[in-house]
């Protein structure tokens, strides 16, 4: 199997599982209890918190564990909306956010809030001048992703953070795809809240975190006990949190070397596909993109059909976000960068990982052109296009 869908999820590393195992078996205590077996688990959570904070440039008491990126996004957006409702009701985001952000904003619109959805250019980058022009006295939040999960484009996060800070507006960024591929410094980049998720960096599923800058007023999202310093109720997922911390540590070990290798493989894959498949187009910024992301539109084919044929060849890829797989609607991200419906439907996303190899890239470059040709040979649209071309 060639697994080129690391943006959807990543395989958990053996070292991560080894770190988790004691907390799935003998170390079963509830961290909120006072006896030794419980306090050992509380200590393990604190150590994971320290590790995650370190790689974000944050303080440990600014890291709050959640069930994943989706909860973190929901908490950030709805928590600010609740906390700042007396100040205003306006939120600014972009048209290409993850659905956890888009749907949270749409939910708030039904409850009296106003949302501005910023346009992006053909590469998926927000216009900073439009951002500035959209700010109102009632603006209470700017939420713009760090890097796009479908097309890989990296946003000008530091500049966005600076604009938000100048206007005294909290800035949240969904960094679920960026963590592990970009060095992040929440202080330098003027980030007030940041969402991240364990299973995108070779950790376990079902655990994530939200960075909340100390002093920022954010309403509680999940009510219950006094866990997470009274801000997020619910008994902690100790094993998951320990695994998350270990995954974070491993991800940033030999970081520069790993990213350089990913960029090399990504560039080779893009070049190999575009040189061997006519009427294909790279989506997203050509250079300022995540190290592992390849998103290409193939004219005259359906992306879902291409994925099925790739799967028959033992190659795993996707047509976009795993959260929307199975949807017949074209990607909102691809439509927002100006692709017509038919080209958006013909898009395939391949995302590499630490274990990806040169041989795997070569095999995809070898097999994909034949798959696209087979699909086009059955396409009346392609047949008509070729007749007109002659």
Image (spheres, grey):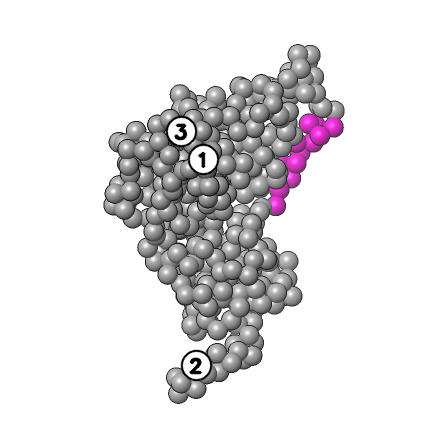
Q: What whole-number distance in Å separates the C-alpha atoms at marks 1 and 3? A: 12 Å
**Residue tagged 3:** 85
Q: What whole-number distance in Å separates the C-alpha atoms at marks 1 and 2? A: 46 Å
Q: Residue 158 sits in which quadrant? A: top left
Task: Identify which residue is drawn at 49% across, 44% down.
Answer: 103
In the displayed structure, does residue 377 sit left or right of residue 344? right
Q: Earlier in the sequence, mark 1 or mark 2?
A: 1
Dominant secondary structure of the magenta stretch? helix
Q: Nearer the viewer, mark 1 or mark 3?
A: 3
Q: Nearer the viewer, mark 1 or mark 2?
A: 1
Secondary structure of the residue carrying numbered label 3: loop
Secondary structure of the residue carrying numbered label 1: helix
| Count of marks overlaid on the render | 3
Closer to the camera in the image, 60 or 118? 118
Percent from the top left, x then y, of residue 111? 46, 37
Tell me if mark 1 has few (under 14), some (14-19) or many (20+) residues whose alpha carbon lies within 10 angstroms of its own.
many
Q: Quadrant of the N terminus?
A: bottom right
**Residue tagged 1:** 77
Task: Identify which residue is drawn at 54% across, 36% down.
Answer: 71
Magenta span:
11-25
Image disc number at residue 385:
2
Q: Per the image, is 205 magenta?
A: no
Task: Identify which residue is drawn at 60% across, 61% down.
Answer: 315
Q: Is residue 100 visible?
A: yes
Q: What whole-number distance in Å separates the C-alpha atoms at marks 3 and 2? A: 55 Å
Image disc number at residue 288:
none
Q: Name above or below for residue 268 compared with residue 212.
A: below
Percent from the top left, x then y, of residue 221? 53, 29
């Amino acid at each position: 199997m060639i697994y080129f869908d690391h943006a959807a999820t990543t395989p958990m590393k053996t070292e991560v599982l080894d770190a988790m195992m004691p907390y799935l078996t003998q170390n079963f205590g509830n961290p909120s209890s006072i006896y030794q077996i419980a306090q050992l688990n509380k200590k393990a959570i604190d150590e994971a918190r320290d590790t995650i904070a370190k790689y974000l440039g944050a303080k440990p008491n600014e890291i709050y564990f959640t069930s994943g990126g989706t909860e973190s996004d929901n908490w950030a957006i709805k928590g600010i909306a609740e906390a700042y409702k007396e100040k205003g009701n306006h939120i600014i985001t972009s048209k290409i956010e993850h659905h956890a952000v888009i749907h949270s904003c749409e939910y708030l619109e039904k409850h009296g809030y106003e949302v501005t959805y910023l346009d992006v250019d053909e590469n998926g980058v927000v216009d900073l001048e439009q951002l500035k022009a959209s700010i109102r006295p009632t603006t209470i939040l700017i939420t713009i992703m760090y890097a796009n999960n479908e097309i890989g484009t990296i946003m000008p996060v530091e500049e966005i953070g600076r604009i938000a800070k100048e206007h005294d507006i909290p800035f949240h960024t969904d960094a679920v795809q960026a963590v592990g591929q970009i060095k992040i410094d929440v202080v330098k980049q003027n980030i007030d809240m940041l969402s991240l998720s364990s299973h995108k960096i070779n950790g376990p599923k079902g655990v994530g975190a939200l960075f909340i800058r100390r002093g920022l007023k954010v309403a509680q999202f999940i009510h219950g006990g006094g866990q997470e310093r009274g801000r997020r109720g619910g008994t902690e997922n100790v094993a998951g949190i320990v695994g998350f911390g270990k995954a974070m540590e491993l991800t940033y070990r030999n970081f520069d070397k790993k990213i350089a290798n990913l960029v090399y493989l990504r560039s080779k894959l893009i070049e190999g596909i575009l040189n061997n498949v006519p009427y294909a187009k790279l989506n997203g910024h050509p250079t300022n993109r995540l190290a592992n992301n390849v998103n290409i539109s193939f004219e005259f084919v359906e992306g879902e059909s291409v994925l099925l044929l790739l799967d028959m060849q033992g190659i795993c890829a996707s047509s976009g976000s795993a959260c929307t797989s199975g949807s017949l609607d074209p990607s909102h991200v691809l439509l927002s960068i100006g692709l017509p419906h038919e080209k958006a439907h013909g898009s395939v996303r391949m995302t590499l990982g630490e274990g990806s190899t040169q041989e795997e890239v070569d095999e995809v470059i070898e097999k994909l052109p034949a798959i696209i040709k087979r699909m086009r040979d059955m396409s009346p649209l392609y047949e008509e296009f070729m007749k007109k071309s002659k």
